[in-house]
């Protein structure tokens, strides 16, 4: 059973109108935004998301047109339906950026691709080459919804030449799995690949460790939840810190705002003062040969009476580790439950949003890069690298904002004295949250070996902002 929440960033039902039409793999590499899915968004009683397909929402005439378009596409490729064993993909990676860093790639499947066979495991892409052996990589199928045969295929782009490459989808035996497991007692999700830890998502409240200094606000506690820690490096070394003595409210990879307003009252979910993220239900988990995913719901509760003011949905997708590193995609969706809610950065400073508190390391390097305002495209990223305890050499963690995030690119803040960096959204201003239109923020985290090489960071940016284009052929 595929949970509606988990499918909220599932495939977009883009219209196809002929053979060989290119299907973009963008949207959310690592997932697709709700706003990319044609149709009206509705919320079930359990606060999960469902989408009313655009054709149904607009009436039977539009739906008949959609069915006709799909029928034309089936005929054009010469298969009805196309079987997985005959499927060939043409992948265009003009600059070769995706191949150099092994970034995630996705394509919508043409209807019931797998013809009744198990679509969730046991398939690979084999590269078709004239001489020698081509690349071979596992794929993972993401259904469009519960019981649906259509969806998206995901894989990590194998190394190879820039330009156009062809791959055949073939059955395969068992592949190594990226696995997500829920710990009911601690209310957290552990992601692992084989015997190696990847990350932990702390859904429930994490108690304050003994020896942590008292909260700066009388009567408050640093106990908190809804964040990622630890994030592990290529050798299994922790890259993040939690409850540091200098700023005990800092916590691994987290998303929160110093200004959390409800009407004329201001609390601070960043510093854990007067508003808290509380878990709502049990997270939905996915595991597979390409990625593992956590889809969780939280409710922000305000004041001592804990009034629900914001519904938060978060998706965390960690991909298998490749030669260049590991990709972790995070999508955050915020919807107001009451009127008068807003979020903002620290007044006078602007910090807040999606932040990293890194573990202490030797040979530290903090790199921030944003192209000039007139640059096209305008690239932006930050990187935190060093020699972390337990690792065999230099390693690092880079953060990229999606180009569709509001106000992209955000100012990049670095606070070397406390090992904290972030793309600060919305900086020094406040942004109101709507009850009707969610605020969606997407980030890609790249865990890598070595230091902050500018060319590799540029490739990671390009592979996400300008992903390979993919089309099916017979």
Image (cartoon, grey):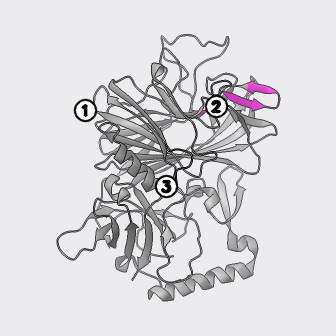
- In this rendered view, identify the residue nearer to me: 192 or 459: 459
The answer to whether 316 appears left or right of 425 in the picture is left
Residue on which disc 1 sits: 393
Q: Where is residue 144 in the image (x, y as percent from the top left)?
A: 55, 65
Residue on which disc 2 sits: 257
- In this rendered view, identify the residue nearer to me: 344 or 461: 461
For numbered disc 1, what is the local secondary structure? Answer: loop
* SS majority, magenta: strand
Q: Give the range drawn in magenta.
A: 256-266
Asked if residue 264 lies in the magenta stretch, the reply is: yes
Residue on which disc 3 sits: 465
Pointer 2 or 1: first along the chain? 2
CA gap, disc 2 and disc 1: 34 Å
The answer to whether 50 appears left or right of 176 in the picture is right
Q: Residue furthest front?
A: 374
Quarter placement of the C terminus = bottom left
């Amino acid at each position: 059973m595929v949970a509606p929440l988990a499918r909220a960033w599932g495939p977009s039902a883009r219209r196809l109108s002929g053979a060989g039409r290119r299907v973009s793999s963008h949207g959310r590499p690592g997932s697709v935004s709700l706003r990319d899915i044609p149709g009206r968004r509705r919320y079930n009683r359990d606060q999960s998301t469902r989408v009313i397909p655009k054709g149904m929402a607009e009436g039977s005439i539009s739906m008949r047109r959609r069915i006709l378009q799909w029928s034309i596409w089936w005929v054009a490729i010469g298969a009805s339906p196309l079987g997985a064993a005959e499927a060939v993909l043409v992948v265009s990676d003009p600059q070769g950026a995706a191949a150099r860093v092994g970034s995630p790639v996705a394509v919508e499947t043409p209807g019931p691709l797998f013809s009744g066979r198990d679509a969730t495991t046991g398939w690979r892409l084999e590269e078709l080459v004239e001489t020698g052996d081509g690349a071979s990589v596992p794929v993972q199928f993401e259904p469009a919804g519960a019981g649906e045969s259509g969806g998206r295929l995901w894989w990590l782009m194998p190394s190879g030449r820039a330009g156009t490459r062809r791959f055949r989808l073939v059955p395969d035996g068992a592949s190594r799995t990226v696995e997500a497991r829920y710990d009911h007692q601690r209310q957290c999700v552990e992601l692992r690949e084989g015997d190696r830890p990847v990350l932990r998502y702390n859904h429930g409240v994490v108690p304050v460790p003994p020896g942590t200094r008292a909260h700066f606000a009388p009567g408050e506690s640093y106990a908190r939840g809804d964040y990622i820690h630890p994030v592990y490096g290529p050798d299994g070394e922790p890259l993040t810190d939690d409850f540091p003595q200098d700023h005990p409210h800092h916590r691994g990879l987290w998303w929160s705002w110093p200004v959390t307003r409800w009407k004329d009252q201001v609390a601070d979910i960043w510093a854990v003062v007067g508003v808290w993220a509380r878990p709502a239900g049990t997270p939905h988990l996915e595991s597979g040969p390409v990625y593992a995913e956590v889809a969780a719901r939280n409710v922000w509760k305000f004041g001592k009476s804990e009034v629900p003011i914001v519904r938060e949905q978060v998706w965390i997708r960690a991909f298998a580790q490749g030669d260049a590193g590991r990709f972790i995609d995070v999508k955050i969706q915020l919807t107001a439950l009451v009127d008068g809610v807003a979020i903002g950065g620290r007044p006078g400073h602007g910090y807040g949003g999606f932040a990293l508190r890194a573990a202490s390391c030797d040979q530290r390097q903090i790199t921030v890069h944003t192209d000039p305002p007139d640059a096209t495209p305008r690239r932006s990223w930050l990187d935190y690298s060093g020699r972390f305890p337990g690792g065999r050499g230099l390693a690092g963690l880079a953060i990229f904002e999606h180009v569709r995030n509001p106000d992209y690119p955000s100012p990049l803040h670095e606070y070397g004295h406390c090992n904290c960096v972030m793309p600060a959204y919305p900086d020094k201003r406040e942004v109101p949250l709507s009850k009707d239109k969610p605020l969606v923020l997407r980030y890609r985290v790249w865990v890598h070996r070595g230091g902050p090489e500018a060319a590799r960071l540029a490739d990671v940016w390009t592979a996400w902002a300008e992903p390979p284009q993919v089309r099916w052929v017979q």
